[in-house]
Amino acid sequence: MIGLSVLITLSSLSLTGCWDREYLKDLHLAYGVGFDISENGMIKETVELIIPPEVEQKSTTSEIHTSYGHNLRSSSNQMRNRVRGNIRFLKNGFQLLGKSVAEQGLYSNLDVNFRDPSNPTSNVRVIIAEGSASDILEQKTVGELKIGEFITQKIESLEEMSLFPKETLDTVFRFLKDPGQDFALPYIALDKDEIITRGLALFHDQYYSGMLNPDQSILLVLLKGQKGKNARFTKKIDLGYPDHIQEYITINAGFKKVKRKFKVSVSADGSVEVDLELKLQAVVEEFPGKHLLKEEDLQKVNQAFSEILTKEAELVVKEVQKANCDIFGVGRKLIAYHHNVWRDKNWSKDYRKVQFHPKVEVKIVDTGIIE
């Protein structure tokens, strides 16, 4: 027994500690990284690095670095050769992809994230830049915020406004592996010195194929059965009041649960039809003017918003079909419940032939602070 105790003691003295430990002082943390295709066809990688202060009382600083490579791994190796220490990406960061990258396909650019277990994926957002991703990151700051902080907060805020679906590296990678489901990603741009929202970038398979504007993006998120804390629409409703400004009413459909019906049916001839219905419970957030919104007018508001949003839903469906983006996962339903039909389809061509029947029903459940 004594011999065993001595052996354990000697063995513990020979241990060197955690072999995979990395000290913060030896690392550079990155909020986000941007990728573009350069003029000579190489991958251009741009990273914002967060530099910890040498003294605790001082705040962190940031640096923007750029490197080039024949693929993502070689550009990353070049990047690490340029900076002091290793690079680790924040788990709540983002990857900003220039439109040139999105048009050439995402798979090869995202696949490397899953080959390195040290790279976070579950909360990392994927964003598309209309022009160059590097141009946006090289802004370095927006007001008092570092560029990475600003973009992260902007995306999270617009997700809460139902403008963007909450897609991450994990969800996008699953879509890329699924032949029956496409996806859409946040689409931003640099307008002079201001970072603005274009809407949603639509994808067919792994390729950028079209876009939706911000108003259409909110409706698409709702049609997918998702939402943030808010989902606002401002529309002109004719109630016959003399003051025309009162015709513009703002509702918020984000407070209540979205009731959604999504049914895919197949006819005897193999044609596919989709019933896509939404029931929205909304709150009137703004009704300007001298007169209060009358109780008898609520039914007119319900009917008018239902008709307007149904027509807009039809336009949204046309846009996603034009982009060949199976954002609702019609193909996934066919694979699961009509596999023989799916097997005989060339979905890249046949998806545009699907007959959608969208319908939106709005019910005002509260007039907010309006009596």
Image: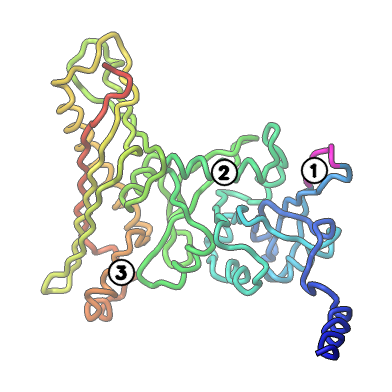
Could you tell me residue 275's position as x and y percent? Answer: 19, 56
Q: Name the residue under label 2.
A: 189
User: Of tags 3 and 2, which is closer to the observer?
Assistant: 3
Residue at image position (84%, 37%) is 57
Which quadrant is home to the N terminus? Answer: bottom right
**What colouring method underlies this structural image?**
rainbow
Q: Mark 3 points at which residue?
A: 331
Q: Pointer 1 and pointer 2: residues touching (CB < 8 Å)?
A: no
Q: Pointer 1 and pointer 3: residues touching (CB < 8 Å)?
A: no
Please tell me whether mark 3 sits on a helix, a strand or a loop.
helix
User: Of tags 1 and 3, which is closer to the observer?
Assistant: 1
Q: Residues within 10 Å of mark 2 (few under 14, many from 20)?
A: many
In-image side of 263 versus 95 (left or right): left
Could you tell me residue 346's position as x and y percent? Answer: 31, 75
Disc 1/disc 2 C-alpha distance (Å): 25 Å
User: Of tags 1 and 2, which is closer to the observer?
Assistant: 1
85 and 9: which is toward the camera:
9
Please identify the quarter of the rendering in which residue 20 is found.
bottom right
Q: Please name the amino acid that badge 3 sits on.
A: Gly
